[in-house]
Amino acid sequence: MSLKNHPAYQPLPTAAAAMDNPAMSNSSSSSGSNDDVAALAQSGLPATYSSQQLVSSDSDTMERHHLRGNNIVDEPGSRLARMGHVKWFTVATLCFVNLINYMDRFTIAGVLTEVKQDFDIDNDNAGLLQTAFVVSYMIFAPLFGYLGDRYPRRLLMAVGVALWSTTTLLGSYMHTFGWFITFRALVGIGEASYSTIAPTIISDLFVNSMRTKMLAMFYFAIPVGSGLGYIVGSKTAQLANNWRWALRVTPVLGVFAVVLILLIKDPKRGESEGQSHMEPTSFFIDIKELIKNRSFMLSTAGFTCVAFVAGALAWWGPTYIHLGLKMQPGNENLQLDDVSYKFGLVAMAAGLIGVPLGSVLAQYYRSRIENCDPYICAIGLFISAPMVFVGLIIPRTSGTLCFIFVFVAQVALNLCWSIVADILLYVVVPTRRSTAEAFQILISHALGDAGSPYLVGVISVAIKKRLSSSTTLLISQNSMQSLSQVLENATETVTESIKDMPYPRAAPTDDVLSFESLQYSLFSTTFVEVLGGIFFLITACFIIRDKAKATSVSLESSEQQRNRNV
């Protein structure tokens, strides 16, 4: 019997599916039973578990016999090796681009003091640099999400990376603050094209536990890239004796990234789940369905809190710790470059541990607790909040302890990255995922790290003014008390009067006021982390139902499309 007489749907070969999902062979999988799979196969539907893992069918064996009959040997082992190389190259390229993406984003944070001095700006305008970038980033994310669900993703990403590399390089030559912040905003447009599309390519290459592992690799590049941004930025500026050279490193790497992107595989949407026949719906229907998806909306709210905290701490962390350490005896000449370097190492180490740890915990507990993913995110935020609070208190006392608490806080915070991405992919149908990524980026950045650096800066400036006025009033009161006591003791000898006179309290230095005002404003991040944990706990109430619904809708839509094509 020839292949053309087979049913229209042909499940993925066993070897390829096993590569993506080693758990397929486990007959006791929590996602479903073999009887359910057999029933689906007999009814003509693709053999799919509720978590979207694939199994083989008799048609795979028939196809291999047909190939052998025509002297075309295509053993599962060779197919696995060939597909493995293509997929590994694709994932490695996406991880590399994500790494330099976040390197570029946080390079300025490593040289923020020099930038402030060069443009003569205060904390509010310094925070506005990051906010301008993220605002353009979130505005253009929905556009690229729409395009990413309908047009070649490889070309869109290549254009985006080329754009942000070019604007970053040009921005380093701007000598007025207005033009500099304009080019930082343009960088956000280019990065929006990449961040909305890259995770959906991974979702179309892998399923189930293998997808979780690949997403962990992809998202662990975020904290590691951020840490490299501090290190590369501070050390390059130190070597060149000019902070502008720090912005000229990632554009060079961006050229190589564009070439690599043009060489990767762009799979069909839904290919890994056997749903490549699905047709995209209109943009308005996509948005309507996403808003109705409670797991997606609640996890997005929780992730927004993660973005708020990550953005504020990443932008102001090195500057704040530097101010605190300078107050310790012997550290008066401490440079921001040294603190940024250490902060970058801590961020990298926390990312190397936190992101994979979140993935490992999710894979371990899914067979025991089906809705464990949001619970892990919530616990991570509840652990991170007190660590951040203590880390904000002790920089003036112990730099070592401060970095230890910052490290633990970031490890706990990093548990969320790959898990939130995985939640989005399994509660949203394949043809809607780029739009969902864009929608999540829009919300999380609009209410998260788009405003947090600027908001923290504005609050710190307001608090600093309040502290300065309070200090001036206190000094004035002390002076009046001193004068009054002198008059009351006028009958005493001059020597005794001078000896007993309480002298006015010395005014705090500008560094002390800057430190205290920034400390009070950063305390807001601990409350936001607790709020994010609450959102994730509520997500756990709906995620099982939404996951099953997304799988069911995907199967029905794909089957209808295949029937129309027969």
Image: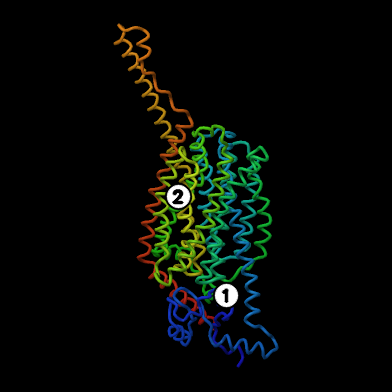
Residue highlighted by disc 2: 308
Q: On the image, which quarter does residue 301 sit in?
A: bottom left
Query: Which percent across, then down, holds residue 243?
Result: 63, 39
Q: On the image, which quarter does residue 200 sit in?
A: bottom right
Q: Earlier in the sequence, mark 1 or mark 2?
A: 1
Secondary structure beneath label 2: helix
Q: On the image, which quarter does residue 63 sit in?
A: bottom right
Residue at the spot 44% in from the left edge and 68% down from the top edge: 427
Task: Tell me the tag on residue 409.
Answer: none
Residue at the spot 47% in from the left edge and 69% down from the top edge: 429
| Three-letter code for the amino acid on which mark 2 is drawn | Phe
Task: Tell me the tag on residue 19.
Answer: 1
Q: Is residue 439 left or right of residue 237?
A: left
Q: Is residue 123 above or below residue 507?
A: below
**Most extreme residue toward the right, as rendered?**
71
| Three-letter code for the amino acid on which mark 1 is drawn | Met
Q: CA distance from mark 1 to mark 2?
A: 37 Å
